Amino acid sequence: MNEHTMVDPDLVEMMESVFTTHRTAIPPSADGAAVLDPQLWKVLDDLGLARLTGSESHGGSGADWHAAAVLLGAAAATAVPVPVAEHDLLAGWLLETAGLPMDGRLRTAFLLTDPREASMVPWARDAEFLVALRRNESSWMVSDIARERATITMVQNIAGEPRDRVTIDVDNATWTSVPDHVAETYILRGALARVLQACGAMERIVELSIEHASSRVQFGRPLSKFQAVQRLVTGIAAETALARAAADAAVARVEREGWNTPGAAFSVAVAKSCAGHAASTVVRSAHQVHGAIGTTHEHELHRYTLPVLAWRSEFGSVSKWDQLLTRTAVDAGRDQAWSLITEGRPVPGVLDIMTPELGIIE
């Protein structure tokens, strides 16, 4: 079931309008770097979209993941870089889970596996507070750390999005204990957010590929009349549809059953795997359809293909999620194959996705 059918149509229209208007008004940066527009962030905050899924008692709008899926997809489909996933679905959720306050200032979150340093932290340079999740010898803990108390080295991913290196003084931060399942849920939430973003971008890639194949003429005929091009476009659309179906199924399951269930972990793992494999086909075939023009900076295709490739590897690579799914299927065995699909079961090793040698911080 498409997420748009689960969300109020007026809300969907408003979300899409915000990002479409912003894309029209603000041209992409000359060097391809993703830059956060403070005015856009203020608009999102004023509309209640920056903290969409937080409870009303915690300063949020009280929406669910169906609405979050539409929001993430709308931003990705317009190539508008904005940290709604990091601020709301990760940082805001961590603070609410820990019983810590949340105000309107921009936040991002990260999992601290090194004693003092984390890499690939999204939007750290723009955030006013950094929400850290770490493990000591007895429990998982959360801290809300002001940006000026951290050292930030600016790094970006292949799509030009901020993925900074952050160093913090663990000993002088205030930490609050959270339940043990929070760390795994954090990874699952981040993975599903990236899947939803990738789906939004791939759906735009489908549109661009159809438009190009229909309008571009070669040898006196539109590209869409060539069977080889038809196969490429069909493959792009099919893989995108598969990824979207898996993403929607995961959202539906976590909304129906909650995050701390066997079905949630399995559904997110399936979605991450499907979207990751789809990304390879979609990006490769889209550039084949567009030819040389699709590789130019002036054409907008790269504004979608590069983020899709970047998001594919965040919160766990495709191969790691495939390994977890394979292990889960083998453990279930032939007799439990159907119940694995319909009910799910625990997916061992989710923490290993991001923490292969998780250390205990003294």
Image (spheres, rainbow, N blue to C red):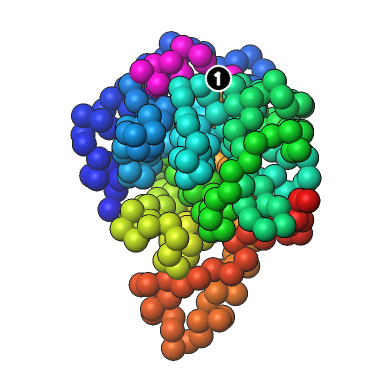
* Residue 57 coordinates in the image, percent (x, y): 34, 34
Q: Examine the structure image and report whether residue 122 is included in the region drawn in magenta.
A: no
**Is residue 281 depicted above or below 288 in this figure?**
below
Left-right relation of 180 to 15:
right
Report the residue marked by disc 1.
Answer: 36
Residue in the foreground of this view, choosing between 220 and 117: 117
Label 1 neighbourhood size at 10 Å, few (<14), some (14-19), many (20+)?
A: some
For the point 49% across and 49% down, which residue is it?
189
Q: Main secondary structure of the magenta part?
A: helix
* Residue 362 coordinates in the image, percent (x, y): 78, 51
Residue in the foreground of this view, choosing between 314 and 302: 314
Q: Amino acid at mark 1?
A: Leu
| Residue segment shown in magenta | 35-46
Q: Residue furthest bottom?
A: 335
Residue in the foreground of this view, choosing between 242 and 219: 242
Residue in the foreground of this view, choosing between 212 and 281: 281
* Residue 69 coordinates in the image, percent (x, y): 38, 41
Left-right relation of 36 to 84:
right
Left-right relation of 18 to 226:
left
For the point 51% across and 21% down, which residue is it?
105
Q: Residue furthest left?
A: 9
Left-right relation of 80 to 170:
left
* Residue 273 coordinates in the image, percent (x, y): 54, 58
Number of numbered markers: 1
**Is residue 54 depicted above or below 150 in this figure?**
below
**Is residue 62 depicted above or below 280 in this figure?**
above
For mark 1, give the secondary structure: loop
**Is residue 217 depicted above or below 26 in this figure?**
below
